[in-house]
Image: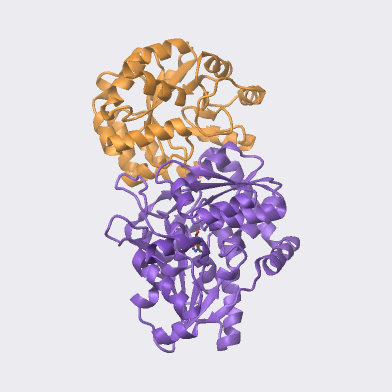
Chain colours: A purple, B orange
Amino acid sequence: MSYFVDENGYYGKFGGAYIPEMLYPNVEELRQNYLKIMQEESFKKEFDSLLKEYVGRPTPLYFAKRLSEKYNTKIYLKREDLCHTGAHKVNNTIGQILMAKKLGKNRIIAETGAGQHGVATATVCALMGMECIVYMGEIDIARQAPNVARMKMLGATVVPALSGSRTLKDATNEAIRDWINNPVDTHYIIGSVVGPHPYPDMVARFQSVISEEIKWQLMEKEGKENPDYVIACVGGGSNAAGAFYHYLDEKEVGLIAVEAAGLGVDSGESAATSVLGNEGVIHGSKTLLMQTKDGQITEPYSISAGLDYPGVGPLHAHLCESKRAEFVSITDDEAMQAGLELSELEGIIPAIESSHALAIFKTKNFKKEDVIVLNLSGRGDKDLDTYIKYFKL
Amino acid sequence: MNRINQKLQEDKKLLSIYFTAGYPQLNDTVSVIQNLENSGVDFIEIGLPFSDPLADGPTIQASSTTALDNGMTSEVLFSQLKDIRKTVTIPLIIMGYFNPIMQYGVEAFCKKCAEIGIDGLIIPDLPVLDYNENYKAIFEKYGLINVFLITPQTSEERIRFIDSISNGFIYMVSSAGVTGAKNSFGNAQKDYFNRIAEMNLKVPQVIGFGISNAATFQMATSKAKGAIIGSAFVKYLTENGVNSISKFITEIR
Ligand SMILES: Cc1ncc(COP(=O)(O)O)c(C=O)c1O
């Protein structure tokens, strides 16, 4: 079985491009060109050099000694939180802004949930001198205020999404509508491995630098490329896709995808798509999503804005159905405690999204000799308000 | 012959109206349809509301949200329309996004449409090729016409292909954009309308998106076979109610 996209844009039965005709020329232009452009020497050179000089890659693969001792196993943290702008999201926006330039676009739009992708997009737009419009749910604007300010300071226009649940799903709808309204000069930088083909594949490729580095870093530290487990949180699935990418075909490597259970999987306030979702179409892709029996997309909930999405990318739907990856859901409370624990044990304050992945150690037992790589997707600066309120700091 | 094809043969410019099922009130669906037919509308697009209507502007988004809050579902719509052919003779088309139809089951949905007397479907986010490979046979089995969209950006080659697999009409999206009323069309639209007219396509074209009044209707139908009014009608319905529908229609032509 292949875990990579096929020539028609599918991962098993998931994927495709379920888009209105208005988007067809844009998406088709991208589909026909993205691989070609990514393989150009000039593109690769510029991408690699920006990742090194601007983003600060390679990010460390840090052995978390005290955390490992506590859980009696061997835990490495892949420090995506140390990327410029504070999360893995920038790997993708660097790639896509270069792509947009190659395609001759001069206006950039993006959606954002936690604001990390919005900031990462605003950042690369500032870097390239391009116009940037970021759609963000009204609720997320309130709970991620520091990121909103950062985007503004970087010169982006932040447009509130006022429809539906006023979170990431609705911001994505608004960005897609903008693209329909501006089909010629605009490139849409999607922030995760979601959306119509070729987005899931393109974003996964840009993020795959994460597992590319893990391989040689682990070789240096452990004398082998393959850990026993790779663990990552999943909102849309981009940091997980990047951390899993070069291990997809390595059967001995266990892949663990951690979703947000919100107040609990059965509480009605959750974002655990793999448990609560079924096959459908969201944002141009056939995948697993949370919906009513009648096919209306339901409003998810998580304390973490970056995981508050009612679907997962088609790659993850395929990994879930084929059981290649194990899907685990973690509640708000479990994640918050895990975030505090990492802060106290290792001096690293994680993004609440990443805290969900960290909470795995409370729910799953690993062997002493297991080598585990956990993708620490982002840092907690943007979440301080939420941490302060939660722990009454 | 399908009612849509019959209608397209009539020697006149066709006026079609889109409205959202279950709006303004859940049980308004049938009376909106009857009022539209009595006012002289040529065919109707019944919008099946969806939580995430990507191709729609604020007016239709809002009517969809209200309709869903009112309790509209595929099941409810089918039960409301169960006896529609006892009173209504003009062509009826359901316009809806793919996900609700997929959840109902594409074949079950088509079967139900055929039983009720629905003549065609418009599913904006169902890709042309996917339809052709996976669903065409089902549509044909139930005698349903699938209507495809083209836009000013659609390539000539693709328009020719869409024309070749169309058996009703082509839905010409007037300009690059989501649904929403406009007061006038500019030169870019006129050029586009002319360009398509000169292609001598196999099936007639009906223009939609941005048609709102007599002027835009006339301009759109100067080249095309007909035009569809959506947002402007939904807005009128919101402000004036079901009983004043005929006034809106009379002012269009
Ligand atoms: C730090 C961090 N981690 C994870 C995510 C979730 O996104 P994805 O699943 O695409 O990695 C986000 C999204 O905003 C984020 O900011």
Kindly tell me whether residue A259 is visible in this rendering: yes
- Rendering quarter of residue A361: bottom left
Picture coordinates of residue B109, whole percent (x, y): 32, 39
Picture coordinates of residue B124, whole percent (x, y): 47, 37
Direction right: furthest residue: A42
What's the residue at 55%, 56% (across, down)? A117
Q: Is residue A310 above or below residue A83?
A: above
Is A5 left, or right, of A370 in this rendering? right
Q: Quadrant of the C terminus of chain A?
A: bottom left
Is B157 left, or right, of B47 in this rendering? right
Q: Is residue A273 above or below residue B19?
A: below
Picture coordinates of residue A258, whole percent (x, y): 41, 67
Q: Is residue B226 above or below residue A99?
A: above
What's the residue at 66%, 24% (across, down)? B191
Q: Is residue A214 above or below residue B63?
A: below
> Residue B165 versus residue B117: which sits nearer the camera?
B117
Kindly tell me whether residue A327 is visible in this rendering: no
Is B2 left, or right, of A108 in this rendering? left
Picture coordinates of residue A274, whole percent (x, y): 37, 61
What's the residue at 35%, 44% (across, down)? A296
